[in-house]
Image (cartoon, rainbow, N blue to C red):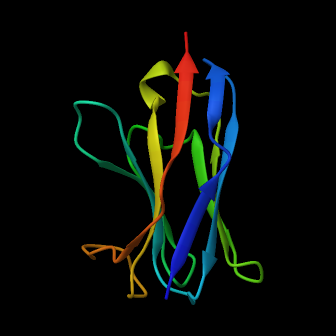
Amino acid sequence: QVQLVESGGGSVQAGGSLRLSCAASGYSNYCMGWFRQSPGKEREGVAFINGDGGRTYADSVQGRFTISKDNAENTLYLQMNSLKPEDTAMYYCAAALRRYCSGTRFDYWGQGTQVTVSS
């Protein structure tokens, strides 16, 4: 059974940084990603990392966020720099039972961690 547990959310002023972590148990080297959702908005894919390490980002976070994975520790990270108020959302870690993320359905989700950016 795959379990994903996020941590690292919090409150920060605009321009600040946060690093989110997602501890994955029962999971191997497949596609993983970060999503976010704020009240009244649809869930948005933020960043993805393939099983081979290839990464993709939403246009809204390109150049500010970095997704990475420590395979030895089975932990996914999202380094978020130059945060903006519009980055405020609940952030979710997700995993898919496929090697590549493009067009895939995500099978497992974490419980979410809140990120709040004040102006």
Measured as percent of width and height from the top left, residue 56 is found at 44, 61
Measured as percent of width and height from the top left, residue 92 is found at 46, 54
Q: Residue at x 55, y 34 (%)?
A: 115
28 with respect to 73 (left or right):
left
Residue 12, above or below 108: above
Residue 90, above or below 40: below
Measured as percent of width and height from the top left, residue 70 is found at 72, 74
Give the residue furthest to the top: 119
Nearest the eye: 60 or 38: 38
Q: Residue at x 63, y 26 (%)?
A: 11
Q: Quadrant of the C terminus?
A: top right
Q: Residue at x 28, y 76 (%)?
A: 104
Measured as percent of width and height from the top left, residue 66 is found at 61, 52
Q: Residue at x 34, y 34 (%)?
A: 38
84 with respect to 38 (left or right):
right
Q: How many marks?
A: 0
Residue 53, above or below 14: below
Residue 116, above or below 108: above
Residue 105 occupies which quadrant of the picture?
Answer: bottom left
